[in-house]
Image (tube, helix red, strand yellow):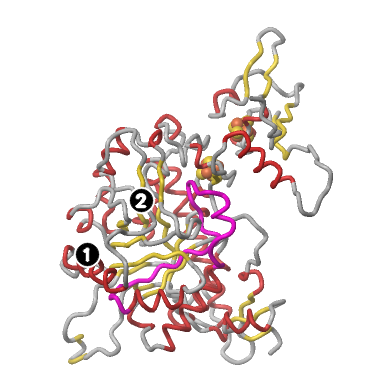
Amino acid sequence: MKSYVLPEFWVDRDDYRCIRCGVCVNQCSYDTHYYDPEDDVVRAREERCTGCQRCAVFCPTNALTIRTHPYEYRPNANWRKENIRDLNRQADTGGVVLTGMGNDKPLRIYWDHLVLNASQVTNPSIDPLREPMELDTFLGAKPDQVDVTCGRVQGSLPPQIHLSTPIMFSAMSYGAVSYQAQLSMMRAAGEYGTLANTGEGGWRRELRVYGASTIVQVASGRFGVDRSYLNEAAMVEIKIGQGAKPGIGGHLPGEKVTPPVAETRMIPVGTDALSPAPQHDIYSIEDLSMLIYALKEATHYEKPVAVKISAVHNAAAIASGIVRAGADVVVLDGIRGGTGAAPKIIRDNVGIPIELALAAVDQRLREEGIRSRASVVVAGGFRNSGDVIKAIALGADAVYIGTPALVAIGCTVCQKCYTGKCPWGITAADPRLGKRINPDIATQRLVNLLRGWSFEIKEMLGGMGINAIESLRGNRLHLRGVGLAEWELEVLGVKGAGR
Ligand code: SF4
Ligand code: SF4
């Protein structure tokens, strides 16, 4: 059947510059380029191009330009190009339109409507180059009071995780991302003194040397979960929801379940790896509490246990229940959170922005007097260190970053992760594509990212006259809103600029 879906990208090859080297033919995992020996030219099957830019980056003579295809339908404010395209994709296949990465709709990005304070005459700014600036962050439940006698804390404290910066790498499962991508994130987290999350897809044995900087996930599929999986990590996270697909679970298609993925997940090769949204032993906060304490028991009360939910309308009430159920960390994943694969209709229409969810959760926990009983970690759409520091001021203890980490190692946010053919080797199922990532280089680039963002955060703190991130946490007086309605300012708990 002839597809009515037009190519999304236009492959523009400068024939004068092209030396017929075939680099593009080899680099494109979608077989877009091919050499035509009869005419001695390289041609493109443009309908296959995802716009990932891999071929253009590697073309030795810069002969390639990949641009959005200029085809036009009659302008129509309701029936936009994307609507017609998606509809035709469904008419072709009869299936659900899948996508990867986070929501790209023009929802309001509140970080861009929040501005930070800076010190002037009183409380002068601090020089971050010459004065000590602390980004040290401790995740875990904090007691309401501690008994210190002769300089020593009496009794035992709940387990705490020390981070050298309030930035961690989000949950990304082996199978959804390649082995090399996961290895690089775990190594970088270890080198920089922070944590990387295994995601729900199990944990390769050879990666367990990075246990001190690893969070392991327990999702409904329980892939790879056993006593050693829980005990060799620094923290355990129960996954209830994910920002990109609230209310639906994880699904790794059988073709991505290769022998090593199957071994890691403890499932047969080639079977679909399904982890439904509901955990079938959790139907109430009491059930959740039983799982939290089962995991604490299994880890001898030595590891903080986190619970991750997607940011939805009643996130504040859910978070309160999670804290009361005994979790040490609450993780909120917002509507712009990334994913390897999700139904597009869910990704783009379900959930709420993380900024609003974070503000509501922090406020509710404070009002109920239980804010210190758990740390709050947020995820979903962080683009730079400015977003991170604003999240801390809104009440987060730390953030997870996913897409920025992938971009640091080559991702161009083409959103085709679900195909398993990522030409950058990041979300690739084929181990030969995974080898396109050099873990030494990728680790260095990730460490550079953490260092660069951390340094920028220190500079912003210095400008505010603050020398420890702890002093900024939840201090909304350092934020002002610009271009926001009264109700938005109220939810965010910040004043409008000029007030
Ligand atoms: S999918 Fe990527 S590598 Fe292939 S032609 Fe398009 S931009 Fe080039
Ligand atoms: S990980 Fe790969 S497939 Fe996914 S958005 Fe990035 S470049 Fe595209």
In screen coordinates, is 88 left or right of 325?
right
Across and down, in percent, residue 302 comes to 20, 68
Amino acid under disc 2: Ser
Q: Earlier in the sequence, mark 2 or mark 1?
A: 2
Quarter of the view holding residue 108: bottom right
Return the residue nearer the eye: 57 or 359: 359
Report x, y in % for residue 456: 55, 67
User: Which residue lies most toward the top here?
Assistant: 38
Element class at badge 2: strand
Q: Which residue is mark 2?
A: 275
How many C-alpha atoms fall within 10 Å of the one at disc 1: few (<14), some, or many (≥20)?
many
Crowdedness near tag 2: few (<14), some (14–19) or many (≥20) residues, C-alpha within 10 Å: some
The answer to whether residue 262 is above or below residue 381 is above
Which quadrant contains ligand 1? top right
The one of 83 and 132 positioned closer to us in this rendering: 83
Q: Which mark is residue 273?
A: none
Q: Secondary structure at mark 1?
A: helix
Residue at x 48% of width, y 47% of height = 340
Report x, y in % for residue 429.
42, 35
Q: Give the label on residue 295, or none.
A: 1
> Ligand 2: does it lie within 8 Å of the C-beta at label 2?
no
Dividing the picture into quadrants, the one containing residue 61 is top right
Quarter of the C terminus within the rendering = bottom right
Residue depicted at 55% across the width and 83% down the height: 476
Where is residue 150, by image quadrant? Answer: bottom left
The residue at 30%/36% (across/down) is 260
Residue farthest toward the right in the current orientation of the protein: 74
Q: Which residues are magenta?
A: 324-353
Q: Is residue 189 visible?
A: yes
